């Protein structure tokens, strides 16, 4: 519970996320083809590859600088709605960490919640709209609950991963109320949301990193 | 797929090179994919920028020039440009009087423009206002959806707001005029064929030889319903009636009537449509003060048409009539 989160581990998380996105690129794009415009996987893959390249070029020592770099890169390279949404998520995480050299598990949970706040501010999504929010919000709540129960961060992240996966699956029967999928109305029902799927990968990447 | 292209991945970049070569009045920032006026920024003039996914030409780059836009940002085909582009464009056109962003109501466009406005204010202190167009009556306007799509009214708004800025009105006035245009305009479209995105190589959706998609969006988004193909007279009625009901337009109103081609429909058919639209409006006592017929906001090679009606008063009409010199609209000069 007291162990600090190093910037190296946070960077490992980002790189693992990029790998998972690459491996799931076609799957994410297929999901998007059903209710969107068939570019979520390729757009996210382009963005995360650019983010990894940016990390290769810059030795970033603080969590704040790391996530700000990732966020700015996503905003500049992804486009569509995912660029501003995932970009804002990482930018707000970066702002939450600030200039501090060290981060506690609670700092990490607070940053994740700040990222969620950024997504809500940018996308105006509410629960049940069939968006990335429906996977991210339960994950943030699950991590907070676990830390309050004195769990290790790694254990809390497993709970967050499971909550994100459950939230992702719950988007399938939902009627889309945001983004391009909302033009489909009833025809959006029965399809899993691509953004929520990406969030589940983000949390999966966290459990595969050495937190 | 049969297209006049070299490589599907180079379509946007090569089209920008062509625009630069064809129009000496304009300049192109190829890195940021911005088309801008050679004489921008003009000291004391409100700058107006727009942008969006490519594939809707001449929107937006074809409307850059005197009396209309100062700059336009081109995204990939049907994909919103990123904030860096709008930030660079905002800096390019800011002559000290602030900058208006004209944004079509699509989730990606709205968010990317919003971020660019925040960045511009933070970096340069430039005052930025945004106007979002949402005139497509085919989409249910509800807090439970992304809202109506921005379509044909965007063209009329860029012309009218551009004239207001050219006359030296301040940012608040230009934005107010733009909002008035959006509030008083309505559109609806019909597709006879799908479009084919170059990188995809195949039609976005399937539409039978004897079918049409009523209420289609400019990226091939589904419409209100799929119907058997009908004579132009019936199609005009299916498009105009929902527009007239929605605002509502009443007898005695003056309008700008805009019959738009979606990219794959010849002008002769658009005039057949215009004739039908004109008859319906005459029957309702709606006076057509000005007309615009042609392909101005397109969906690549989609065959079909959209109708836009904008209720106008003398002020909006005089701004519409003001001089304009752009690749796609040019009069009074």
Image (cartoon, grey):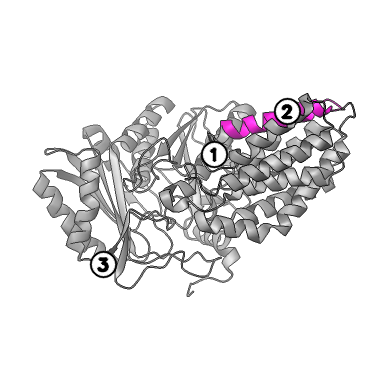
Residue placed farthest to the front in the image?
A149
Residue placed farthest to the bottom in the image?
B2
Q: Are marks 2 and 3 on the same chain?
A: no
Q: Main secondary structure of the magenta part?
A: helix
Q: Position of residue B68 (x, y in %)?
A: 40, 43
Q: Is residue A99 magenta?
A: yes
Gap between marks 1 and 3 measured at Cα: 37 Å
Seen from the viewer's position, the closer of residues A31 and A164 is A164
Q: Are marks 1 and 2 on the same chain?
A: no
Left-right relation of B214 to B287: right
The local crowd at label 3, few if under 14, some if 14 to 19, many if 20 or more residues have their Cα within 10 Å, is: some
What range is drawn magenta here? A97-121
Q: Is residue B58 magenta?
A: no
Q: Position of residue B29 (x, y in %)?
A: 59, 50
Gap between marks 2 and 3 measured at Cα: 58 Å
Question: Which tag is nearer the camera, tag 1 or tag 3?
Answer: 3
Sequence-wise, the earlier of marks 1 and 3 is: 1
Q: Chain of mark 1?
A: B
Q: Position of residue B16 (x, y in %)?
A: 54, 58
Residue B250 position (above or below residue A32): above
Label annotation for residue A145: 2
Residue B33 position (above or below residue B96): below
Q: Position of residue A151 (x, y in %)?
A: 82, 30
SS of the residue under disc 2: helix
Left-right relation of B255 to A107: left
Q: Which residue is mark 1?
A: B111
How many discs appear? 3
Q: Chain of mark 3?
A: B
Q: Which residue is mark 3?
A: B229
Is residue B278 visible in the rendered structure shown here? yes
Residue at left offset 47%, top offset 58%: B55
Residue at left offset 85%, top offset 32%: A152
């Amino acid at each position: 519970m007291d162990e600090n989160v190093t910037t190296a581990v946070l960077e490992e998380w980002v790189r693992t996320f990029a790998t998972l996105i690459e491996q799931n690129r076609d799957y994410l794009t297929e999901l998007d083809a059903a209710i969107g415009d068939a570019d979520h996987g390729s757009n996210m893959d382009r963005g995360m590859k650019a983010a990894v390249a940016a990390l290769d070029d810059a030795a970033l020592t603080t969590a704040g600088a790391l996530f700000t770099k990732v966020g700015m890169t996503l905003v500049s390279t992804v486009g569509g709605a995912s660029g501003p949404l995932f970009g804002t998520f990482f930018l707000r995480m970066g702002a939450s960490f600030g200039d501090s050299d060290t981060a506690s598990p609670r700092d990490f949970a607070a940053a994740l919640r700040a990222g969620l706040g950024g997504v809500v501010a940018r996308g105006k999504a509410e629960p049940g709209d069939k968006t990335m929010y429906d996977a991210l919000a339960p994950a943030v709540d699950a991590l907070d609950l676990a830390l309050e129960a004195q769990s290790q961060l790694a254990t809390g992240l497993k709970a967050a991963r499971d909550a994100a996966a459950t939230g992702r699956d719950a988007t399938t029967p939902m009627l889309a109320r945001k983004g391009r999928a909302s033009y489909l109305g009833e025809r959006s029902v029965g399809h899993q949301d691509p953004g929520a799927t990406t969030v589940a990968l983000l949390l999966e990447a966290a459990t595969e990193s050495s937190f | 797929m049969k297209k006049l292209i070299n490589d599907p991945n180079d379509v946007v970049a090569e089209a920008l090179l062509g625009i630069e070569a064809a129009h000496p009045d304009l300049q192109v920032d190829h890195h940021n994919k911005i088309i801008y006026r050679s004489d921008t920024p003009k000291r004391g003039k409100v700058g107006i920028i727009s942008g969006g996914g490519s594939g809707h030409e001449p929107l937006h780059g074809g409307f850059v020039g005197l009396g209309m836009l100062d700059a336009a940002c081109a995204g990939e085909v049907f994909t919103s440009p990123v904030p860096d582009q709008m930030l660079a464009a905002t800096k390019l056109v800011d002559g000290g009087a602030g900058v208006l962003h004209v944004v079509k109501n699509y989730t990606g466009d709205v968010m990317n423009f919003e971020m660019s406005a925040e960045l511009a204010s933070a970096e340069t202190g430039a005052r930025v206002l945004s106007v979002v167009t949402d005139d497509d009556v085919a989409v249910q306007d509800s807090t439970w959806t992304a809202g109506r799509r921005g379509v044909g009214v965007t063209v009329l708004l860029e012309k009218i707001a551009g004239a207001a800025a050219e006359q030296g009105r301040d940012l608040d006035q230009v934005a107010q005029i733009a909002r008035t245009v959006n509030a008083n305009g309505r559109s609806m479209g019909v597709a006879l064929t799908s479009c084919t995105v170059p990188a995809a190589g195949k039609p976005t959706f399937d539409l039978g030889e004897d079918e049409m998609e009523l209420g289609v969006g400019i990226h091939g988004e589904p419409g209100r319903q799929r119907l058997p193909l009908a004579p132009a007279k019936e199609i005009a009625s299916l498009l105009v009636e929902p527009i007239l009901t929605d605002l509502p337009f009443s007898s005695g109103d003056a309008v700008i009537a805009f019959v738009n081609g979606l990219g794959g429909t010849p002008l002769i058919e658009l005039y057949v449509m215009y004739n039908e639209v004109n008859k319906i409006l005459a029957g309702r006592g709606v006076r057509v003060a000005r007309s615009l017929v042609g392909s101005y906001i397109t969906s690549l090679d989609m065959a079909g048409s959209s109708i836009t009606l904008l209720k106008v008063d003398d002020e909006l009409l005089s701004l519409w009539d003001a001089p304009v010199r752009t690749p796609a609209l040019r009069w009074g000069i």
